[in-house]
Image: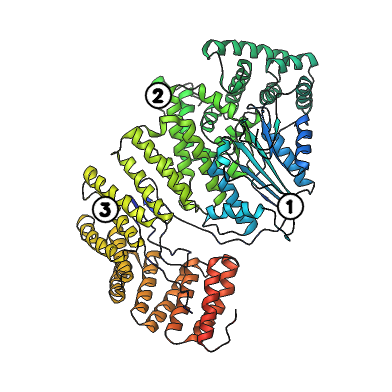
Amino acid sequence: MLDPTVFEGALVAGGEAQYGADGGDHVDFRGGLFSGPVTGKGDHHHYYGARRPPAAWPHQVGVIPPRAGSFQTRAEVVRLREALAGGQAAVLVGQDTVRGQVLSGMGGVGKTQLAADYARTAWQAGELDVLVWITASSATAAASGYAQAAVEILGAEPADRETAARAFLAWLEPKANAAPCRWLVVLDDVTDPADLNGLWPPAGPHGRTLVTTRRQDAALAGRLIKVGLFTEAESLAYLTAALGARSRLEPDEQLIGLAQDLGHLPLALSQAAAYLIDAGISASAYRALLADRAASLADAAPEVLPDGQTQTAAAAWSLSVDRADTLRPAGLARPMLQLAAFLSPNGIPETVVTSAPALAHLTWHRAEDGSQATPQHMSRQEERDRTPVSVTANEAAGALRVLHRLSLIDHTPATPHQAIRVHQLIQRATRDALTPDQHDRLARTAGAALTAAWPVIERDTELAQALRANATTLTRTAGDALYQPDAHTVLYRAGRSLGEAGQATAATAHFQRLTQTTSHHLGPDHPDTLTARHDLAYWRGETGDAAGSAAAFEELLADRVRVLGEDHPDTLTTRHNLAWWRGEAEDAAGAAAAFEELLADEVRVLGEDHPDTLTTRHNLAYWRGEAGDAAGAAAAFEELLADRVRVLGEDHPHTLATRSNVARWQGEAGDAAGAATALEELLANRVRVLGEDHPDALTTRNNLAHWLGEAGDAAAAAAALADLLPHTVRVLGEDHPNIRHIRDSLAYWRGKAGETPRV
């Protein structure tokens, strides 16, 4: 039996789009050491947290939207319960079909609220063991939701979310002799039924699927439940209850008239009730305001409004925004709503709208509107020259509360990753009121706000998923704005986030589309198009197509040399990654030769101590070893280590990683005892610097055990692995692939030590 040993491999970093992080070791015990491309559009890092143990039932995944005030129990509630009672799927649509139960309907009729009511009621009644709520506005969003469910419920590996999503759908399949699980999967806001191809939950006696969508396609298989407008009785009951909760009483005939004015649209009625309560005016006075505003809007608006809006409903939203903008903090509600209009209707992280670009947008708008008080003694010139007082995060939060108060948004700070929800009708109406210049400026501001809120290292998978959903919405709502004057950073960050989440195939598809769109908008030789091609080539390699990745980098290199020149940093980076993927495509000698040529040019162009130069030396040594020259690799890593210590210091992660590779190749060159000694010293430093639970510390302990055994001390190797095993189980989980590696190694070295193999 061969020992399934654990080795650390190459490190790659630096440069415009050079993949890899020249630093801490990858959690993966299986070899090469890297963590994604680093590009001029934002550094790229993989971070996969410890694998969590499977959650005990009952368990909920995802956030159910908050219950609307004065929620009405409608006929559709009864129909939905009857449809799902038999374990089938349902689709809530607007006034036509989907598999499961499908709630379908025009915007603003309350499909999501009905689905949320059903899910919340079933959960609170103890009818469910597992509840999964997924905002399924795209195929990627649906797959991400399934992957998160697999991580939480199955204890799936968070590093491979594509596999995790498939595993969860397979887990939902009914199985003989398995304990029955009563599950409900809610797929909210399905935009295109084709997005659910291969992602539809299976039918089963204990499972239920509920979908909400505006679509009414025959492709939506399941019982269709059409959700329409309120009836007159429902409208009156809603307005009476909403106003009565604030001790307001209005004549029934006025409330019925108001409901008729607003077309019995639940969303518009909620805004009307909020306005009546906040402004303290009568229903008759509000109806007069509505009529005047609707008339003025009709003069400037198209004859047919989008999404089935009426002029009076649009007038209700317009009045509410005007009212909100007068409330403290004055002048911030409208620009806040305008920013949110470009982002996901199903949940915007509060960190996005309180980021520096968002606050700068609010500050600029307040100064433009003159909402900032001006001292009476100030001259006009002094007023023009005065620097506006910056809007604070607390004031931005105050603007959110004002919008919530007028029922223009839902603001739930208790769910920070989905703190702000805005109905798509309100978003559309808000965007349609913008001039083209305002639209484009706001779109790029929204992109900047998303980018600013995006962590460099994605430790929180739910936050990353929410940010990707917002980027997807922004790409749709922004139009061409994200490509003028250049391709916005957020387009690249969203794609890399997919890859960092373990969705390499989705990342490849993202950058394929981005390459096409940047080429269309900016031209094939624009630097942003070349950057998109670079990321496309990288993620193609990450899907397992190393040869295809190398070929793509080779084509890109020719274009970068032609467009940018041989010594441009991006050209050098492309050469670097071409060399790497040649090695991954099993041409280690070719990789080493290419890195050797690159090194000479980087020393000339960048200098000997530049991070990219040191990284190239690292990878040259690595591939030299992989090509069979272990002694040469060990010597090269020894020389590099001295420079790492001099440039970065003893405790820098890159220095520690280089020391690990010195030990590896020292052992590969025949000095197993020397490798073990070097790893003992490294382990002490890694525990001191990183902590004993850090993946790099666990990797070092595993490698130390291997070289102890190779040095002839099988008993010590077995003892070290026996001590490592429970520690790794605690950190990574019982089902992590590394646990199998350690168990196999433990059995192997126990056998070598003369013990009866056992685990």
Q: Is residue 472 left or right of residue 595?
A: right
Q: Residue 544: give its label.
A: none
Question: Which residue is pictured at 49% across the width and 44% down the height?
Answer: 453
Question: Which one is in front, 255 or 214?
Answer: 214
Q: Mark 2 highlights which residue? A: 384
Q: Is residue 282 visible?
A: no
User: Do the residues bearing badges 1 and 2 touch, measured as CB atoms within 8 Å?
Assistant: no
- Vertical comparison of 601 with 76: above or below: below
Q: Residue 521: image x %, image y %?
A: 35, 32
Quarter of the rendering occupied by the C terminus: bottom right
Q: Is residue 1 visible?
A: yes
Q: CA distance from mark 3 to mark 1?
A: 54 Å
Front tag of 1 and 2: 1
Question: Which one is in front, 331 or 140?
Answer: 140
Q: Quadrant of residue 264?
A: top right
- Vertical comparison of 65 with 305: above or below: below
Front tag of 2 and 3: 3
Q: CA distance from mark 1 to mark 2?
A: 63 Å
Q: Residue 164: image x %, image y %?
A: 57, 55
Q: Quadrant of residue 336?
A: top right
Which mark sits nearer the N-terminus, 3 or 1?
1
Q: Residue 129: give its label.
A: 1
- Vertical comparison of 258 with 195: above or below: above
Q: Mark 3 highlights which residue? A: 572
Q: Residue 160: image x %, image y %?
A: 52, 56
Q: Amino acid at mark 3?
A: Leu
Judged from the image, the secondary structure of the residue bearing numbered disc 2 is: helix
**Outermost residue toward the bottom?**
754
Front tag of 3 and 1: 1
Question: Which residue is pictured at 51% across the width and 25% down the height?
Answer: 431
Q: Amino acid at mark 1?
A: Asp
